[in-house]
Image: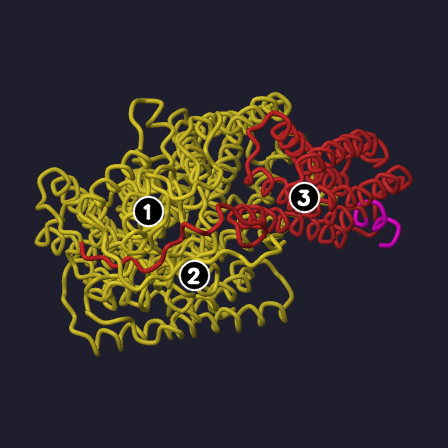
């Protein structure tokens, strides 16, 4: 599997000193811009392979779904504000809470985290694009079409209504006639295909495309978090694809996976779903941990305390996350001994989380904290997440779990973990990286106002739900009688939800206003730690004029006054440096593919197949040919291209000059 | 900028076989994903076994003859596969073409036999949960075989039509890796489908 060339492998040439001439720099800049051109026009728009453009679209799309999911949540809070309320009927309410959970988990949380990775990871590791850029484009369109399908289903009153985890037999053919559950099952397929593709890209980018010098022990914590997330996606998502495909087959062609009458088993669904579903929680908040590490480092002006412990904690979380799934199933009558094991495992997860919390606290304690908006969100995260973690540990204990099973205590807990663990870091991250992505600063005063509105609104909404859970209020009821005495707390929660909505609107307003009229951002407005701040705001299509050589774990803070860079990367084609996994020493150069329309077309055919298979099994044979055609078109090389090695071509302007200087 | 040019990567090659290159990582990534899927489906097979008294539940055992013959063919394909991989890594265009065509041909033969294997299962997918899982298991693998046959055919065509670049040889080498993966998975899947009903 290694290179077959018998003679000694060619090595990069190390040179002591060589400075590029300004003329050569300008020529290089111009040529790189031409080579890495993002494209224009409709076809160009659909063909884009630039990770920043795709990343921005991915983020914007996921945030739009977040907004829609938030509106659905507001509708539920409106309905529950008063006892015996009949604003929304039970059938509509079932669709709304199912949509809310499904949208937030599958169309917002996972995609937005991967989208942040798509945008930031190549910049942070110092390369020009993500690995497999066409796959990235394909992933985005599959995700987009899947989301659109679900909302079209809602508009035609066919949205799923069996809860976001779609338990069988409720979601099966006997109890959910019509197409509602099928839309849910296929949405899973859409989003998982998209997520798995991005996960492979992230792993490859992080392992093989890091700038020279960024050895494993110099990878930024944010990138580590995204790497762990990608691995978790790779191992968790096949379970849910299996589960939802079985469900679809049961409903469409009469298989019996979940049918106990014919040897199937309904609990099988829960095992498969939660084997994915529990890691899913970590898939969502591990990236959040990475964002918080990036923000805290920058705003305390020091590297995060305990780098090795932090990395090991992230990796440990990734492993332990797969051993917890049964704690979602304590009420299903599984053997006592098994439950005990899963209680213990669920408590162990507190250790790596605790280590990270303490490392952040030490970093803040020992640093010089600046309380800018991103930092406020990071601190808000710590508070909320610790609280959510504690309510999680209580839930892991079987007797207590049975007491509050399927009550609002659970709703309160997972909103503390997910909003605290993922949404707060994410909003902090948007404030933090907005200048990099758009070239504009967001308004600080509005930013701080939005933080406090969200922080207070969040606690007012979700804290009372713990008590509602103690009082026995079950989740997913569309209304409740006044005698239960749940009215006041529900009203308080609804008031909080209004605040949350207002806070969200403030963030949105701030973003739009800043995007249009905000002050111009400098390349490195926060004095950040990692490489994305070494380039322009927003970065040029080729990311870096020269691939940097990384000198320390804090790439920006440990950079020498005249930073070392790589030369000899071709600028007349989309060439990147491929490095080795451990030390990030250059191994070879590799030409990444150009933009093309085929991934889009392939995504269209894939989507038609997924939607078609909701209605007929014939979708598979019918779509195989167009699918094969689009895939072959995707891989077919364009014309006679120059891929042979070229000896010091003219296009190497600065390199040639530096070589000549070196010889002279 | 006052950047110092300290590292000139121009002499480095433009491609690499195996784990040094990007394509290997993509291929292995998808092998891990699909491998996880195979594992899940096999686990479900045994999980469902635990739910009933007899296996297969009120159905005859599958016939092993044809499937075993096909297993032998699939295993034998490892030889041309190894030769294709070796030829690709030596940039031997003539041999790579030849072995890729052979591989495509063997894959196609396997697929045709596979179609007849479905008749040897002695169950339908909608008979009961046993039938469902058997059909899914064999179909999941068949899809992989079909994908790689098309993949090999396209690669072979590319090598005949051109332009032939070093990258094509890397693709051919990774294609062989993927074929090993498919062959390797057929062993546990074959044992599960055709022998577990007799052993369990």
Tell me the red chain. B
Residue A429 picture quarter? bottom left
Q: How many angstroms separate mark 1 from mark 3 (CA)?
A: 33 Å
* Residue at horizontal 34 percent and vertical 76 percent from the top: A306
Name the element at disc 3.
helix
Name the element at disc 2.
loop
Have a look at marks 1 and 2 and say if they share a chain: yes
The chain to which mark 2 is attached is: A
The residue labelled by disc 3 is B176
The residue labelled by disc 1 is A119
Quadrant in which the C terminus of chain B is drawn: bottom right
Q: Would residue A30 be counted in the magenta stretch? A: no
Q: Nearer the viewer, mark 1 or mark 2?
A: 2
Return the residue nearer the eye: A154 or A427: A427
The residue labelled by disc 2 is A584
Q: How many angstroms separate mark 2 from mark 3 (CA)?
A: 27 Å
Q: How many angstroms separate mark 1 from mark 2 (CA)?
A: 21 Å
Mark 1 or mark 2: whose residue is earlier in sequence: 1
Q: Is residue A72 visible?
A: yes
The chain to which mark 3 is attached is: B
Tell me the shade of chain A. yellow
Q: Point out residue A205 in the picture as x, y percentages from the top left corner.
A: 43, 51
Q: Residue lying furthest right in this view?
A: B65
CB atoms of marks 1 and 2 within 8 Å: no
Q: Would residue B197 be counted in the magenta stretch? A: yes
Q: Is residue A631 left or right of residue A287?
A: right
* Residue at horizontal 73 percent and vertical 33 percent from the top: B98
The chain to which mark 1 is attached is: A
Q: Point out residue B121 in the picture as x, y percentages from the top left corner.
A: 83, 37
Have a look at marks 1 and 3 and say if they share a chain: no
């Amino acid at each position: 599997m290694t290179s077959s060339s018998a003679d000694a492998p060619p090595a990069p040439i190390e040179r002591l000193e060589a400075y590029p001439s300004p003329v050569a720099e300008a020529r290089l800049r111009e040529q790189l811009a031409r080579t890495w051109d993002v494209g224009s026009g409709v076809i160009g728009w659909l063909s884009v392979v630039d990770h920043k453009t795709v990343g921005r679209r991915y983020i914007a799309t996921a945030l739009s779904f977040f907004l829609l999911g938030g509106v659905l949540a507001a509708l539920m809070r409106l309905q529950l504000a008063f006892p015996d309320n009949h604003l929304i009927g039970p059938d509509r309410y079932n669709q709304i809470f199912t949509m809310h959970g499904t949208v937030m988990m599958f169309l917002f949380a996972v995609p937005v985290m991967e989208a942040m990775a798509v945008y930031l990871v190549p910049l942070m590791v110092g390369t020009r694009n993500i690995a497999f850029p066409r796959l990235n484009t394909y992933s985005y369109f599959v995700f987009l079409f899947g989301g659109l399908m679900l909302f079209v289903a809602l508009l035609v009153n066919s949205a799923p209504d069996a809860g976001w985890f779609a338990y069988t037999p409720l979601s099966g053919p006997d109890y959910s006639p019509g197409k509602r559950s099928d839309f849910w099952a296929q949405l899973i397929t859409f989003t998982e295909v998209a997520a798995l593709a991005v996960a492979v890209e992230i792993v490859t980018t992080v392992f093989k495309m890091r700038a020279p010098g960024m050895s494993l022990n110099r990878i930024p914590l944010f990138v580590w978090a995204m790497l762990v997330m990608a691995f978790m996606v790779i191992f968790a998502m096949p379970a849910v694809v299996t589960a939802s495909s079985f469900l679809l087959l049961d409903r469409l062609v009469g298989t019996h996976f979940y049918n106990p009458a014919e040897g199937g088993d309904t609990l099988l669904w829960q095992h498969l779903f939660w084997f994915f579903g529990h890691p899913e929680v970590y898939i969502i908040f591990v990236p959040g941990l990475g964002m918080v590490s990036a923000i805290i480092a920058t705003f305390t002006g020091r590297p995060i305390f305990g780098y090795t412990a932090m990395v090991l904690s992230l990796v440990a979380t990734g492993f332990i996350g797969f051993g917890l799934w049964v704690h979602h199933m304590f009420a299903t009558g599984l053997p006592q001994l098994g439950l005990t094991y899963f209680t213990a495992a669920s408590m162990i997860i507190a250790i790596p989380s605790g280590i990270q919390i303490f490392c952040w606290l030490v970093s803040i304690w020992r640093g010089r904290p600046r309380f800018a908006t991103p930092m406020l969100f990071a601190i808000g995260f710590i508070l909320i997440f610790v609280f959510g973690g504690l309510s999680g540990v209580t839930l892991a204990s079987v007797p207590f779990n049975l007491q509050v099973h399927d009550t609002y205590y659970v709703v309160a807990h997972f909103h503390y973990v997910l909003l605290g663990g993922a949404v707060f870091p994410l909003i902090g991250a948007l404030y933090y990286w907005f200048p990099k992505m758009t070239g504009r600063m967001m308004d600080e005063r509005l930013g701080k106002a939005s933080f406090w509105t969200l922080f207070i609104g969040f606690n007012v909404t979700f804290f009372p739900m713990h008590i509602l859970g103690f009082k026995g209020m079950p989740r997913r009821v569309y209304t409740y009688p006044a005698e239960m005495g749940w009215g006041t707390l529900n009203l308080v929660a609804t008031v909080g939800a209004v605040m949350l909505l207002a806070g969200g609107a403030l963030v949105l307003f701030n973003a739009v206003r800043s995007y249009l009229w905000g002050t111009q951002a400098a390349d490195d407005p926060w004095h950040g730690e990692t490489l994305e701040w070494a380039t322009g705001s927003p970065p040029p299509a080729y990311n870096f004029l020269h691939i940097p050589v990384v000198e320390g774990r804090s790439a920006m803070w440990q950079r020498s006054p005249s930073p070392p860079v790589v030369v000899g990367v071709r600028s007349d084609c989309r060439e990147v440096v491929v490095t080795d996994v451990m030390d990030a020493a250059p191994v070879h150069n590799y030409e990444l593919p150009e933009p093309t329309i085929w991934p889009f077309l392939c995504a269209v055919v894939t989507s038609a197949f997924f939607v078609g298979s909701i209605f007929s099994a014939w979708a598979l044979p019918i779509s195989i040919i167009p699918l094969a055609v689009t895939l072959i078109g995707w891989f077919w090389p364009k014309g006679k291209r120059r891929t042979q090695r070229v000896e010091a071509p003219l296009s190497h302007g600065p390199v040639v000059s530096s070589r000549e200087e070196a010889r002279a | 900028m006052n950047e110092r040019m300290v590292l000139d990567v121009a002499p480095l090659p433009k491609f690499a076989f195996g784990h040094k290159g990007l394509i290997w990582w993509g291929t292995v990534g998808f092998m891990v994903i699909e491998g996880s899927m195979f594992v899940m489906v096999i686990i479900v097979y045994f999980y469902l076994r635990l739910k009933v008294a007899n296996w297969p539940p009120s159905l005859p055992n599958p016939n092993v003859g044809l499937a075993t013959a096909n297993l032998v063919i699939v295993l034998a394909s490892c030889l041309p596969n190894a030769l294709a991989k070796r030829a690709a890594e030596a940039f031997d265009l003539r041999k790579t073409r030849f072995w890729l065509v052979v591989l495509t041909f063997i894959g196609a033969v396997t697929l045709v036999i596979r179609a007849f294997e479905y008749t040897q299962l002695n169950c339908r997918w909608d008979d009961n949960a046993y039938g469902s899982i058997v059909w899914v298991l064999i179909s999941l693998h068949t899809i992989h075989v079909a994908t790689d046959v098309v993949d090999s055919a396209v690669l072979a065509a590319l090598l005949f039509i051109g332009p032939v670049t070093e990258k094509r040889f890397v693709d051919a080498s990774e294609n062989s890796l993927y074929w090993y993966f498919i062959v390797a998975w057929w062993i546990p899947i074959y044992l599960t489908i055709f022998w577990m009903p007799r052993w369990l």
